[in-house]
Image (spheres, rainbow, N blue to C red):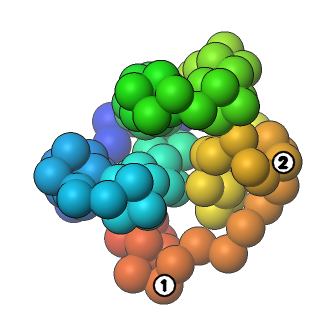
């Protein structure tokens, strides 16, 4: 997608990344990262950034399966977004199929609907 991420979506994306950094548990961290990922999908750079953060977390948590999945996703995220070929709602985790569409949480869907 060639246009810039709208400010409302960018603010929500950055807020989710901040929540992930401040999270007290791995579960809360990944929940925020998944939400950030969903928000980022239509834009190549933020989508790639979301996967880079996910890779860092996976490495920090010594989760080899997640780290390997994030490496693969880093390779395809930017080009997929640039071409408009991404699985809407996918949480971006290695535990879900790469191209599996998933329901978008209603609050995120409302933000993305305005774009």
Q: Quadrant of residue 71?
A: top right
Task: Decide if residue 45 is in sight here.
Answer: no
How many marks do you count on the picture?
Answer: 2
Residue 100 quadrant: bottom right
- Along the horizontal axis of the image, is 65 left or right of 56? right
Q: Residue furthest bottom?
A: 106
Q: Nearer the viewer, residue 46 or 58?
A: 58
Asked if 63 appears above or below 28 in the picture, the reply is: above
Instruction: Give x and y (percent) for residue 49.
Output: 40, 27
Disc 1: CA contacts within 10 A as few (<14), some (14-19) or many (>=20)? few
Q: Secondary structure at mark 1?
A: helix
Q: Is residue 76 left or right of residue 16?
A: right
* Image x and y of residue 109, in percent: 49, 75
Quarter of the picture containing the C terminus is bottom left
Dot 2: element: loop
Up the image or down, 111 lies above or below 24; here it is below
Q: CA distance from mark 2 to mark 1?
A: 22 Å
Eye-nearest disc, 2 or 1: 2
Residue 27 picture location, percent across and down: 43, 62
Residue position for label 2: 97
Vertical order, 50 against 40 (above or below): above
- Give the mark nearer the N terminus: 2 vs 1: 2
Pick the front one: 94 or 61? 61
* Mark 2 crowd level (few <14, some 14–19, many ≥20, 10 Å Cα): few
Q: Residue tagged by mark 1?
A: 106
- Please tell me which residue is depicted at 52% across the width and 78% down the height of the picture: 105
**How far from the left and from the top, in percent, is residue 56?**
41, 24
- The residue positioned 33% from the left and 43% from the top of the image is 5
Residue sitting at x 21%, y 45%: 21
The image's mark for residue 94 is none
The residue under the point 64% across, 46% down is: 93
């Amino acid at each position: 997608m060639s246009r810039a991420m709208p400010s409302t979506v960018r603010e929500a994306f950055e807020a989710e990344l901040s929540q992930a950094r401040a999270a007290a548990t791995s579960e809360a961290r990944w929940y925020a990262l998944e939400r950030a990922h969903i928000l980022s999908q239509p834009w190549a750079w933020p989508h790639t950034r979301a996967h880079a953060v996910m890779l860092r977390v996976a490495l920090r948590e010594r989760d080899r399966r997640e780290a390997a999945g994030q490496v693969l996703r880093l390779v395809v995220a930017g080009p997929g977004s640039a071409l408009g070929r991404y699985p809407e709602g996918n949480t971006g985790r290695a535990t879900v199929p790469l191209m599996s569409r998933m329901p978008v949480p209603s609050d995120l869907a409302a933000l993305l609907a305005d774009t």
